[in-house]
Amino acid sequence: SIPIAVCTDNFDDYFHNEWGCHWHYETEFGIIKKGTAEFSVYSGKEQSAIMLRQGDGILVNSGILHSARALAPDTAISGFVLPIAFFCKPFENAAHQIISPVTGSDVSYLTFKSDNENDRQLLSSMDEICSVDEQEVGCELHYIEMVCKIWRLLTIRILQNEQTEKTAANKAQERRVKQMLSFIHNYYSEHIGINDIARAAAVSRTECFRCFNAVLKKSPSEYLTEYRLSIALMMLANTDRTLSDISFSCGFNSPSYFGKLFREQCGMSPKLYREHTRKQQ
């Protein structure tokens, strides 16, 4: 009944211990529970690398391209994503006034450091929302209470920050990358190529490569392959589907080619990875 998604993730469970570059309409909050992680955020001018240690937190604003990777084994993060629709029903006519200072700002991300006294209230509130017991009496009210507190503190923080402007070229490039990533995420299981990816943003092959290199520092083919392998990794760990089925479901032409790529990227065969993961579980 409350539009909020809360979870804890261990980066060891992900391909190359990272989340590939992506974006979403929700605002994203995270706190490092163990280890060290690096977030990369594309702000329209350059890619910012943000190192977070245990106890540190981050906000990634709505619609912002970002990725994250662990810098140490067994790195875990607790977090939640909050759709702007959270405020629409209870606050109705006042919703835009509440939402816009955060999502309508030019702030791509904010970091909160555990050793900074000014950040402790926000970090404590973020940690509390990730620890709500859904069996407790009034847990929905608990979520609403903490979200409103966090949003109020964020609004104050953002309005105090200096605003930066993106150039028209930066905005166009960022918009195109978002369109192409959405296409890949929706159609990775099909036999898509560079021309298909480029058409998703109505750009040429050359502009497609230029956008990916500028934002992600990799080619469209590299991103597509890594995304397919990341999905395959999850299927191997969490399903009993055959290797052949997983291979074709992830868009690879043949199980042998899938196995070759998997060994190159992961250092072991898909079968061995599945066995290793099952033992750990």
Image (cartoon, rainbow, N blue to C red):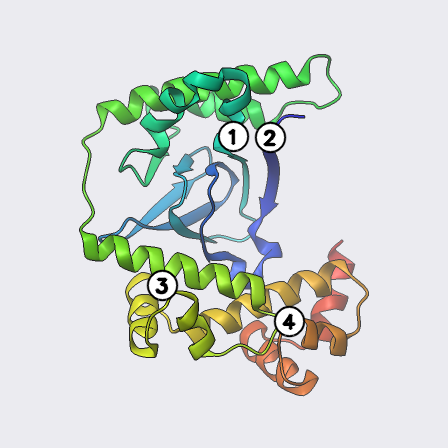
Q: What percent of the width, then of the height, locates residue 3?
A: 60, 30
Mark closer to the observer (2, 1): 1
Q: Is residue 128 visible?
A: yes
Q: Secondary structure at mark 2?
A: loop
**Crowding at label 4, few (<14), some or many (≥20) Cα neighbours within 10 Å?**
many
Mark 4 or mark 1: which comes first in sequence? 1
Q: For residue 250, which numbered disc appears in the image?
A: 4
Give the residue pinned by disc 2: 3
Q: Are marks 2 and 1 in contact (CB under 8 Å)?
A: yes
Q: Is residue 152 above or below residue 184?
A: above
Query: Would you say 183 lies left or right of 257 here?
Result: left
- Give the residue type at disc 4: Cys
Q: Secondary structure at mark 3?
A: loop
Q: What is the spatial separation of the Cα atoms under label 2 and label 3, in whole angstroms?
A: 30 Å
Give the residue pinned by disc 3: 216
At a point 44% along the width and 71% down the height, the residue shown is: 197
Give the residue pinned by disc 1: 85
At a point 25% along the width and 23% down the height, the residue shown is: 159
